[in-house]
């Protein structure tokens, strides 16, 4: 499953807002909104997201 789907599923199941997710995960409150608009992720950000989702049971 790609990272966008994993994030959207996590947001839906956890009830967390996209802004909170971006801020908590990578200190960027616009992360999810930018990704929805086509933002490409670098390797470092991808690893931080993967780690965050793993820590939070996603």
Image (spheres, helix red, strand yellow):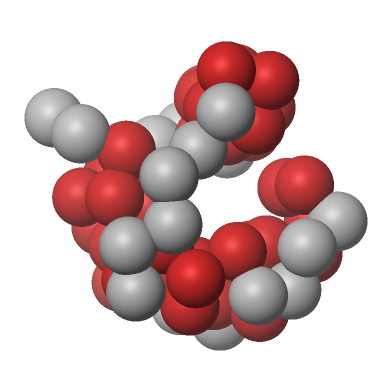
Q: Quadrant of residue 1?
A: top left
> What is the x, y in percent for residue 16?
55, 74
User: Could one spot residue 1 in this view of the protein?
Assistant: yes
> What is the x, y in percent for residue 54?
52, 23
As drawn, is 14 to the left or to the right of 52?
left
Vertical relation: 37 (above or below) 54: below
Most foreground residue, 45 or 24 = 45
Q: Quadrant of the C terminus?
A: top left
As drawn, is 52 to the left or to the right of 10?
right
As drawn, is 53 to the left or to the right of 52?
left
The residue sitting at 60% across, 64% down in the picture is 31
Most foreground residue, 26 or 58 = 26
Q: Residue furthest left?
A: 1
Vertical relation: 17 (above or below) 27: below
The residue sitting at 43% across, 44% down in the picture is 40
Most foreground residue, 58 or 28 = 28
């Amino acid at each position: 499953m790609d990272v966008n789907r994993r994030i959207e599923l996590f947001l839906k199941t956890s009830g967390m807002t996209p802004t909170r997710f971006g801020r908590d995960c990578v200190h960027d409150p616009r992360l999810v909104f930018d990704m929805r608009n086509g933002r490409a992720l670098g390797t470092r950000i991808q690893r931080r997201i993967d780690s965050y989702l793993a820590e939070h049971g996603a």
